[in-house]
């Protein structure tokens, strides 16, 4: 994570806010800023900071409002017009490259622990939210790695919040019937990275542990002892299930997919699966 400065005008209320938006979340260091820089023609990155130049510069507005990446930031993006690889010759009609003109907002949220409440607050707030991308660093998800625990911890909280959104006082949250969430397993160029299928099963196993320890914590603190239902409300996924599976979220209209890629490294970015997922949701 590096600071992002929002240069000149903060987005106009009209126009941009009606664009479909995709929320980008994930632990610090997973590659969110790198992904934003890759997809936004308006984000210029230097080694120490990035400057976001919004596309709609409006005359007469106060200049130079700055914004650091400590709070959510919206970036207007276009699906990239990729080079057509030989193997991709036979593209279907709903191929992302055919949707290259489609614009969307990518909303970056801070991944730092203390700042996470922003991310969680904003989960269900953006207008016209089409989906959530949870970016994970696939190179730190081996069994026993602290990265696996902290990633699972964060993902557990996000999923629980989505599961509980129907109880929310926020009307926009209630309106979101189905929420697609893509777990984008990043840094596949690194040799320590787990393949996507293993990222999925490792996270499921680790979330099972998080779920168990959270419910034990509740019992120890006495919360939920008198009223059994309160404890159940904080249980992620299927009540009574031994192992957590992402498919258990379907009951709550949260549709989880996992796809691998890399923003940098290797022989350049490999992000086609993620674009495809976005394109299918715009
Ligand atoms: P953020 O905290 O989520 O915004 O993460 P950053 O975008 O700042 O990335 C953290 C570090 O991971 C930086 O040093 C990036 O260069 C590096 N990084 C991001 N994506 C990739 C990737 O796909 N492969 C490799 N090898 N490094 C990456």
Image: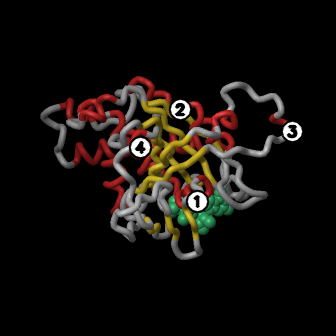
Ligand 1 within 8 Å of disc 2? The answer is no
Q: Is residue 62 left or right of residue 79?
A: left
Q: State whether residue 122 appears in this view.
A: yes
Q: Tell me where residue 45 appears, x and y as whole percent.
A: 58, 68
Tell me the distance, in whole angstroms, between the alpha carbons under discs 1 and 3: 27 Å
Q: Is residue 186 left or right of residue 115?
A: right
Relative height, residue 31 to residue 216 (above, below): below
Query: Which sits in the foreground, 217 or 154?
Result: 154
At 82% across and 41% down in the image, what residue appears? 85
Ligand 1 within 8 Å of disc 1? The answer is yes
Q: Secondary structure at mark 2?
A: helix
Label for residue 266?
none
Q: Which corner quadrant of the image does residue 178 belong to?
A: top left
Tell me the distance, in whole angstroms, between the alpha carbons under discs 2 and 3: 26 Å
Tell me the distance, in whole angstroms, between the alpha carbons under discs 4 and 3: 38 Å
At 37% across and 26% down in the image, what residue appears? 177
Relative height, residue 136 to residue 29 (above, below): above
At 38% across and 64% down in the image, what residue appears? 70
Label for residue 15?
4
Query: Which sits in the foreground, 280 or 13?
Result: 13
Mark 4 or 3: the one toward you: 4
From the image, tell me which residue sits under label 1: 37
Q: Secondary structure at mark 4?
A: loop
The earlier-in-sequence mark between 1 and 2 is 1
From the image, tell me which residue sits under label 2: 281
Mark 1, other Cα within 10 Å: few <14 / some 14–19 / many ≥20 = many
Label for residue 86?
3
Tell me the distance, in whole angstroms, between the alpha carbons under discs 1 and 2: 21 Å
The earlier-in-sequence mark between 4 and 3 is 4
Residue that protrudes farthest toward the front in the picture: 60
Q: Which color scheme is applied? A: secondary structure
Where ligand 1 lies, by quadrant?
bottom right
């Amino acid at each position: 994570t590096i600071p992002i400065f929002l240069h000149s005008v903060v987005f106009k209320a009209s126009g941009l806010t009606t664009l479909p938006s995709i929320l980008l979340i994930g632990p610090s260091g997973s590659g969110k800023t790198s992904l934003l820089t890759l997809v936004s023609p308006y984000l210029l990155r230097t080694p120490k900071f990035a400057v976001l130049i919004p596309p709609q510069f409006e005359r007469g507005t106060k200049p130079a409002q700055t914004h650091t990446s400590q709070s959510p930031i919206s970036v207007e993006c276009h699906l990239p017009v990729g080079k057509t690889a030989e193997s991709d010759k036979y593209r279907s009609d709903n191929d992302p490259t055919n949707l290259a003109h489609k614009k969307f907002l990518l909303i970056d949220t801070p991944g730092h622990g203390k700042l996470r409440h922003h991310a969680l607050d904003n989960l269900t707030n953006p207008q016209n939210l089409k989906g959530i991308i949870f970016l994970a660093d696939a190179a730190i998800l081996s069994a026993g790695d602290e990265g696996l625990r902290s990633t699972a911890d964060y993902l557990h909280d996000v999923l629980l919040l989505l599961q509980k959104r129907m109880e929310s006082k926020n009307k926009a949250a209630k309106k979101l019937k189905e929420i697609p969430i893509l777990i984008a397993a990043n840094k596949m160029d690194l040799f320590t990275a787990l393949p996507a299928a293993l990222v999925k099963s490792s996270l499921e196993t680790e979330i099972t542990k998080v779920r168990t320890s959270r419910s034990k914590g509740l019992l120890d603190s006495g919360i939920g002892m008198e009223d059994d239902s309160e404890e159940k409300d904080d249980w992620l996924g299927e009540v009574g299930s031994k192992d957590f599976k992402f498919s258990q979220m379907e009951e709550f209209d949260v549709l989880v997919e996992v796809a691998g890629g890399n923003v940098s490294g290797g022989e350049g970015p490999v992000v086609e699966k993620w674009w495809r997922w976005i394109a299918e949701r715009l």
